Image (cartoon, rainbow, N blue to C red):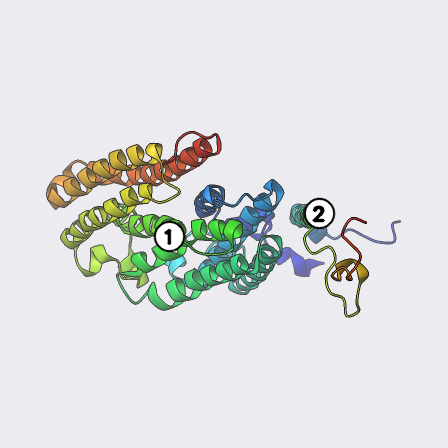
């Protein structure tokens, strides 16, 4: 039995390594936004069906994460942040990740179609295709606008949640999509400003590298300005309400102020104080999204009690 | 002496197999739960099944509903 002793115990893929392939941290955002999309919809969903639907939406998101790690294994090996992922660490092979991702994608779409409706299942399939093929394979390495397009994949979950309840698409679900879609670029580019990663070595065009940091700062401000009317405007759709309106006005004013500060800063000043404004803006962007979706949930809860809403 | 011998591989993969077993069991529970919910909601309990079924046919003339 000496043949097996060449394998090192530490290299054996454990259950947790397969969980890591699903990008659990990204999954938590998917679960939250999909849940809000489902709960604010005007059609009630049986709690068990809702639970199952959210579970398989999350699994579908995980499947696209696994497919992303399969395709990006070569650049994950180069960048410090991603070196510890299961494939670069040598615990899972590319082929295993591909098979795992495809199998989970199939299971999650079919199960969502059975639990909720066929439209939601197809929508999830489209989302996985969009993230794994359109973003990861086609665009990530070819355009500095990759973040913008990839943001669409992250913006679909509340629409899927809405589709689980209603079986379709509406202004409200498109508004939730637009908020996340327009929020993603400033969120990521502020991260790119202070996380000076070697994207260029890995062959990924980042706006900070291709067009410079000054242009990136301008883009961040531009997106906060475009995002604000969309986010505030959502207050006047059927899912909006007074809580959401107040929250959105406050958060957008602060977000634009943060974007303005980033735009005004000179690179030397930013470097001198360790990118404090950029880091604060990045942290605030997380609070921004969380506050918007929590406010939608709060207004919908008040409406069900007969108070709040318009 | 035992007829079967546990290979060292089995011990190494125990955690993985336990995890997979739990996931499969959870899937069974999930599908069962879904079935209960769908049946209770009465979704398509009786649909067209290639032969006329009295209970899904329109009531013939003369027999009032709730006779």
Q: In the displayed structure, does residue B19 sit left or right of residue A227?
A: right
Q: In the displayed structure, does residue A64 sit left or right of residue B31?
A: left
> Where is A39 relative to A207, above or below?
above
Residue at the outermost bottom position: B50
Looking at the rendering, in which quadrant would you find the N terminus of chain A? Answer: bottom right
- Residue at label 1? A171
State the image coordinates of residue A267 (x, y, percent, origin top left).
Answer: 13, 45
Instruction: Tell me, for residue A217, which label it has, or none.
Output: none
Task: Tell me how far mark 2 sits from mark 1, CA to CA.
Answer: 39 Å
Q: In the displayed structure, does residue A98 sit left or right of residue A261?
A: right
The answer to whether residue A87 shows anywhere in this view is no
The answer to whether residue B39 shows anywhere in this view is yes
Residue at image x 50%, y 58%? A124
> Where is A167 relative to A36, above or below?
below
State the image coordinates of residue A306 (x, y, percent, origin top left).
Answer: 46, 30
For residue B33, which quarter of the picture? Answer: top right
Pick the residue in front: A36 or A19: A36
Query: What SS does tag 2 mark?
Result: helix
Crowding near pointer 2: few (<14 within 10 Å), some, many (20+)?
few
Instruction: Tell me, for residue B25, which label it has, or none.
Output: 2
Q: Are marks 2 and 1 in contact (CB under 8 Å)?
A: no
Judge depth for marks 2 and 1 and give the one in front.
1
Chain assignment, label 1 = A
State the image coordinates of residue A191 (x, y, percent, origin top left).
Answer: 28, 46
Chain assignment, label 2 = B
């Amino acid at each position: 039995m000496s043949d097996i002793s060449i394998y090192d115990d530490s290299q054996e893929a454990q259950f947790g390594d397969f969980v890591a392939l699903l990008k659990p941290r990204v999954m938590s955002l998917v679960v939250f936004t999909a849940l809000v999309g489902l709960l604010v919809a005007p059609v009630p969903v049986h709690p068990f069906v809702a639970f199952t639907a959210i579970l398989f939406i999350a699994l579908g998101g995980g499947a696209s994460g696994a497919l992303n790690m399969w395709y990006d294994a070569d650049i994950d090996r180069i960048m410090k942040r991603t070196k510890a992922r299961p494939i670069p660490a040598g615990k899972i092979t590319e082929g295993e990740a591909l098979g795992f991702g495809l199998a989970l994608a199939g299971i999650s779409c079919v199960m969502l179609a059975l639990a909720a409706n066929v439209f939601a299942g197809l929508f999830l399939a489209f989302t996985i295709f969009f993230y794994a093929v359109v973003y990861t394979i086609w665009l990530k390495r070819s355009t500095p606008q990759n973040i913008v397009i990839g943001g669409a994949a992250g913006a679909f979950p509340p629409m899927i949640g809405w589709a689980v309840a209603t079986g379709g698409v509406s202004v409200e679900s498109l508004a939730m999509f637009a908020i996340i879609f327009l929020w993603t670029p400033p969120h990521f580019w502020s991260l790119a400003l202070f996380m000076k990663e070697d994207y260029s070595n890995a062959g990924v065009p980042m706006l900070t590298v291709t067009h410079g940091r000054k242009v990136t700062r301008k883009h961040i401000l531009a997106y906060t300005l475009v995002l604000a009317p969309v986010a505030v405007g959502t207050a006047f759709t059927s899912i909006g309400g007074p809580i959401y309106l107040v929250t959105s006005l406050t958060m957008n004013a602060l977000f634009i102020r943060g974007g303005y500060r980033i735009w005004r800063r000179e690179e030397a000043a930013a470097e001198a104080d360790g990118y404090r404004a950029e880091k604060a803006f990045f942290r605030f962007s997380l609070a921004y999204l969380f506050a918007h979706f929590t406010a939608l949930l709060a207004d919908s809860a008040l409406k069900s009690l007969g108070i709040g809403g318009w | 002496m035992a007829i079967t011998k546990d290979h060292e591989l089995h011990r190494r993969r125990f955690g993985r197999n336990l995890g997979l077993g739990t996931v499969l069991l959870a899937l069974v529970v999930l599908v069962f739960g879904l079935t209960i919910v769908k049946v209770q909601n009465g979704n398509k309990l009786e649909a067209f099944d290639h032969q006329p079924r009295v209970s899904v046919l329109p009531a013939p003339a003369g027999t009032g509903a709730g006779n």
